[in-house]
Image: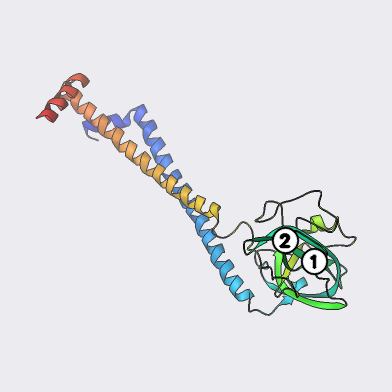
Amino acid sequence: MGGVYRFLLTPRWWGINVFALLAIPFCIFMGTWQLSRFESHVHDHRSETEQAASARTETPRPLEELLPVDKETVGRRTTATGRYATQLLVPDRELDGKQGYYVLTLLRTDSDKALPVVRGWLPGSADSAKAPAPPSGRVTVTGVLQASESPGDDGVTARSGLPAGQTSVISAASLVNLVPYGVYDAWITLDTADAGMKTVPAKAPQGSGLDLKAFQNLGYTGEWFVFAGFVVFMWFRLLRREVEAVRDAELGLTPETSDAEEQRTAAV
């Protein structure tokens, strides 16, 4: 190695070199990992779009074939047979920019467990007198399968002190406290709402798709690659300054005389 670059073998520069050799691959690895997370969100979003499109035309499958609900089965059309039992209202639900409520009726199936069925949406404050009564006798329903809700999901706010006959969250955990029988850990929204109500569109599954978190991953990708570039930039800058210092020393120049020489050169 040339005399000018002998300083690279000093303990100080060993430390700088080791730091750079470790930091650059680490930043590239983290940037690549964040990029893969963003691509995963994009893939999930594409899969959801394709699944939603196919679900509208696919033949409904029996409920038992689609349980338990997961990313592969949520949004699929399903069918179940039973008798309507307890009816509840779900307040504070928005549709087409208007506030209203869901009419939720539990369908007692042959397994004696109940499937929560959103039969439709009505505008205004929840009012059991305005909610159409469910059909009597044995019925077969067809709709889109949904996962149980949790407080914090889009449009879902847990409320306490609701009047009897109302629930703020559609989930087995909340419904088992309101009815004297078992409830499936899933629910459906009818393909076509019952008379007098608007059809409730199916929700996209939580935690997937092109949401804010996906674009955060993309932002972190850029940050990590910038960090890697900054390490390279600083390494070359330090190297250049060190080389200049060595050459100045070989010429017998002190930092003060070197600065004065630069000023004279700039003035010329």
Q: Residue at x 73, y 71 (%)?
A: 197
Q: Where's residue 245, x and y in %?
A: 23, 26
Q: Is residue 69 left or right of residue 245?
A: right
Q: Where's residue 11, x and y in %?
A: 36, 27
Alpha carbon of mark 2 to alpha carbon of mark 1: how far? 10 Å
Which amino acid lies under the numbered mark 1 shown in the image of this protein? Lys
Which sits earlier in the primary sequence, circle 2 or circle 1? 2
Q: Where's residue 193, x and y in %?
A: 72, 73
Q: Residues within 10 Å of mark 2 (few under 14, many from 20)?
A: some
Q: Where's residue 240, x and y in %?
A: 25, 34
- Name the quadrant of the C terminus: top left
According to the picture, the residue beneath numbered tag 1 turns out to be 130
Residue 94 visible at all: yes
Label 1: which secondary element: loop
According to the picture, the residue beneath numbered tag 2 turns out to be 124
Which amino acid lies under the numbered mark 2 shown in the image of this protein? Gly
Q: Nearer the viewer, residue 237 or 212?
A: 212
Q: Nearer the viewer, residue 229 or 46?
A: 46
Quadrant in the rendering for residue 196 = bottom right
Q: Are marks 2 and 1 in contact (CB under 8 Å)?
A: yes
Extreme-right residue of the structure: 180
Label 2: which secondary element: loop
Q: Nearer the viewer, residue 213 or 245?
A: 213
